[in-house]
Amino acid sequence: MSDDLRVAVLGVGMMGSFHASTLSTAVKGATVTVINDFSAGTAAKVSAGIPGSRVVADPFEAINADDVDAVVIATPGAAHEEQVLACLERGIPVLCEKPLTTGIDTAYRIVQREAELGRQLIQLGFMRRFDTEYAELRALIADGGLGAPLMVHCTHRNPDVPPHFNSEFMIRDSVVHEVDVVRFLLDTEITAITVHKGLATSRAPEGVNDPMLVVFETSTGAVATDEIYVRTGVAYEVRTEVVGETGSALIGLDQNLVRTTTDGRWGGTLTPGFVQRFGAAYHAELQRWVNAARNGTIDGPGAWDGYAAVAVCEAGVEAVRTGQRVEVRMSPRP
Ligand SMILES: NC(=O)c1ccc[n+]([C@@H]2O[C@H](COP(=O)([O-])OP(=O)(O)OC[C@H]3O[C@@H](n4cnc5c(N)ncnc54)[C@H](O)[C@@H]3O)[C@@H](O)[C@H]2O)c1
């Protein structure tokens, strides 16, 4: 349709190709017009599956193309800063995959630049906020259904990950989701972080602490834990339990899946990967972003949420390195 939001997708590896496909096949009001990737072969292959799209080799040319109204950034974190800033300079909405950037100073510079413009143009890809279970849990807490929240217990397990997932990368790339979940559910900031490194699985490469137990302290005094274990060999298991003064609630039990009782046994199937668990959330995230971007704004976690997550993960990486409790350093919100 002629009034569709015309979107450029930068970086069409695992996440970007999924977003491009969802935008093109399932999201209303959007057309993917431009595909960009450092790998010409990858870009050509993905573009071939997206009718009406063309390949633009340079990411900045893609951002500034005449047939682009908004941008999805799914390049690796190190490329985000320059690409997000280029979207801000052009004044167009951008959905940037987490992390916002890979450094606290660069993330804050982006927050400041957006504040100078006086318009919210940056949305962060924290898709769990669009998952029905997380949204219902947040509403339950906000409505006082659990009384004052005292503790949060998170579990984040993957069946396997590529070898570059070392201890620090696990904090920046995986734990970052729980950082946002805790901030989202409790509506508070994380003030300090400690990382306990126990016995590593024999599947972990030499020197990699997998699993780890992360402990977050928050500004209300509520404590949150996150077991991060990315080489379980089992399935994708993401669970969150909130313990309040008058009750507790647990999500992530794959209750949507069929339970079987056969041969005197009962059970079901765990989700094999993040797409099966959060596919609907990615779709909702993109649909709401497209609706908002057509009006020149965002509808979801913004640059400040991206900055806060970077700040906590920066402290988390220091906690891994030093074995100490590390306080989160955040500059004031502009
Ligand atoms: N929200 C989520 O649940 C979720 C899940 C997975 C990944 N991610 C995030 O998505 C981003 C991409 O992750 P991925 O797993 O798809 O990685 P990937 O390696 O599969 O894909 C990245 C792609 O970007 C291309 N690329 C690299 N540098 C580029 C540049 N400067 N300009 C243009 N293209 C470039 C690469 O050639 C590759 O095709 C990361 O920020 C990651 O943290 C988010």
Image (cartoon, rainbow, N blue to C red):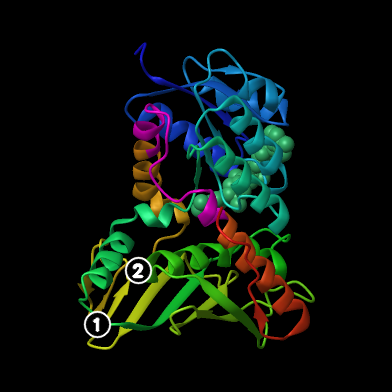
Give whichever of discs 2 and 1 has the lower sequence position. Answer: 1
Instruction: Name the residue carrying label 2.
Output: 252
Q: Which residues are magenta?
A: 289-306
Position of residue 285 measured from the top left corner of the image (x, y, whole percent): 39, 44
| Magenta region includes residue 218 | no
Which residue is depicted at the point 47% across and 53% down? 126
261 or 213: nearer the eye?
A: 213
Ligand 1 lies in quarter: top right
Instruction: Indicate left or right for 29 with 82 as reference.
Output: left
| Magenta region includes residue 302 | yes
Q: Is residue 277 visible?
A: no
Residue type, label 1? Gly
Which residue is depicted at the point 25% across and 61% down? 256
Position of residue 294 measured from the top left corner of the image (x, y, whole percent): 38, 26
Quote the CA–CA distance across marks 2 and 1: 21 Å
Instruction: Indicate left or right for 147 with 15 as reference.
Output: left
From this view, report whether residue 117 is shown above or below residue 218. Answer: above
Position of residue 15 measured from the top left corner of the image (x, y, whole percent): 55, 43
Callout 1: SS: loop
Q: Is residue 199 visible?
A: yes
188 or 314: nearer the eye?
A: 188
| Front label number (2 vs 1) | 1
Quarter of the figure that contains the N terminus: top left
Instruction: Name the residue carrying label 1.
Output: 147
Graded by Cα atoms within 10 Å as few (under 14), some (14 to 19) or many (20 or more), the crowding at tag 1 reads some
Which residue is depicted at the point 73% across and 31% down? 38
Position of residue 240 measured from the top left corner of the image (x, y, whole percent): 39, 73
159 or 223: nearer the eye?
A: 223
Graded by Cα atoms within 10 Å as few (under 14), some (14 to 19) or many (20 or more), the crowding at tag 2 reads some
Callout 2: SS: loop
